[in-house]
Amino acid sequence: MDLTMLRSQFPALAQSNNGYPLCYLDTAATSQKPQQVIDAMNHYYHFDNANVHRAAHLLSARATTQYEAVRDKLCQFIQARRREEIIFTHGTTEAINIVANGLTSQLKLGDLILIDAAAHHANIVPWQELAKRTGAIIKPIPLTTDCRLDSAAFDTLLLEKPAIVALGHVSNVLGTVNPVSNLVAKAKQVGAITLVDGAQAIAHMSVDVQDIDCDFYVFSGHKMYGPTGIGVLYGRFALLDSLSPLMTGGEMIKTVSFSGTEFNQLPNRLEAGTPPIAEVIGLGAAIDFIDAQPKAQVSAAEQTLLIYLQDSLKALGDVVLYGAHSDNLGAVAFNLAAEHHQDVGILLDQQGIAVRCGHHCAMPLMQSLQLNGCCRASIGIYTNKADIDNFITAMQSVKELLL
Ligand code: PMP
């Protein structure tokens, strides 16, 4: 794998910050975009710009063909059974909202919703709102002291026969990977509906929704080298079809009259209004980009780099790592002694290093770690050893300054 060649495809990486080469370690927040994604979106706006579906003219036909081709690509990318199981959304957040809202009439007072205690707010708040509407009860699935999902506690909670189990595939803070196939299999045995938030998994591993066997799997385009404003809701057909739509209006109907409206079939039924067409096309280009890389080599290289990052931080001393395991993916969470994470982040930025600081939209996880926040360094396909070395050199000087 030629990493120099690969990096050269990401124009944003070739710049400096404060006189230092930009060292982008914030891929978990959003990934940089390869030129082919930018080009695909530009091409659409230059030549094919038209609304999709319905129209009889050339540009609309071209836009529609490209838009629907991405649905087919995604179907294959995550091994869905049929293309109608792929719904375009604006991101992971919207996808979870569609599910949580759509299940309202299927839940009743006292039903139990289990949520991964390390979940992102996007996989917590929509369920809390569902609980408010229905009288359902929410319980977190606790973590072990080393920040993995507590499998024994999960088994005990399953005895209460939850209606819904919402899991993260990979923690956006810690990078911990949940054994989702196993957890989903157990949840299914007690009849629960399962949703897996794959926002942090999709760029780092092959995802096979049939193998995971979850009912819903959701992710965002912008974390997998695609554009912002586009995400995917995969749903098992029958269950997806049973969701009442969150958004109604054009595109999602079959017939409308003032005596009533008949909704369209999937996937249109859950895609009201003009969709983010350029973004869908950009996502298609991102899938082409990922598919063109040697998968096994990429994941081995990312794994080596992540362990190097963890080990280098440990070797620095005075750094506290949270939930760092050798089988984590993509991210390392840390603090420098008792220093405020924001101070560390700002001082790193002065040396060209981009990391993220704060609660990372995972306040319950922060509470269980007894933290106000932490720093997170995260890697992508383009991250190289020099990025890590530059980061560690900068951390050394931050340490000398603050401690
Ligand atoms: N879940 C996880 C695990 C995430 O990392 C993120 C983004 N930080 C989200 C959900 C929300 O994704 P989006 O903001 O793209 O909707």
Image (spheres, helix red, strand yellow):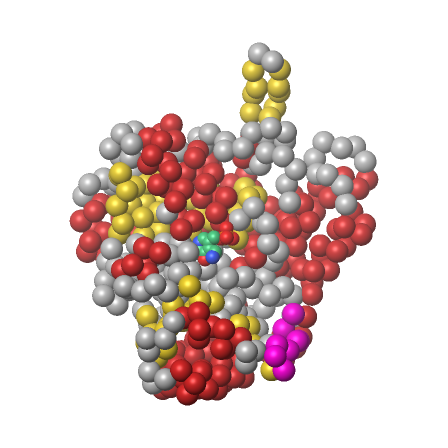
Residue 171: x, y in percent?
39, 60
> Against 245, is 42 above or below?
below
- Give the quarter of the image for residue 172: bottom left
Residue found 33% across the figure and 78% down from its top: 337
Residue 108: x, y in percent?
30, 29
Q: Is residue 384 visible?
A: no
Of all residues, the one furthest to the top in this rendering is 259
**Does the magenta run of residues contain 17?**
yes
**Does the magenta run of residues contain 181?**
no
Quadrant where the N terminus sits is bottom right
Position of 376 with respect to 338 (left or right) is right
Residue 69: x, y in percent?
65, 47
Residue found 63% across the figure and 64% down from its top: 33
Residue found 53% across the figure and 72% down from its top: 354
> Against 301, is 43 above or below?
above
Residue found 44% across the figure and 67% down from its top: 357
- Give the quarter of the image for residue 170: bottom left
- Give the quarter of the image for residue 327: bottom left
| In the foreground, 4 or 80 | 4
Q: What count of labels does the image hold?
A: 0
Q: Which residues are magenta?
A: 12-19
Residue 180: x, y in percent?
35, 55
| In the foreground, 308 or 1 | 308
Q: Is residue 26 visible?
A: yes
| In the foreground, 19 or 224 | 19
Quadrant where the C terminus sits is bottom left
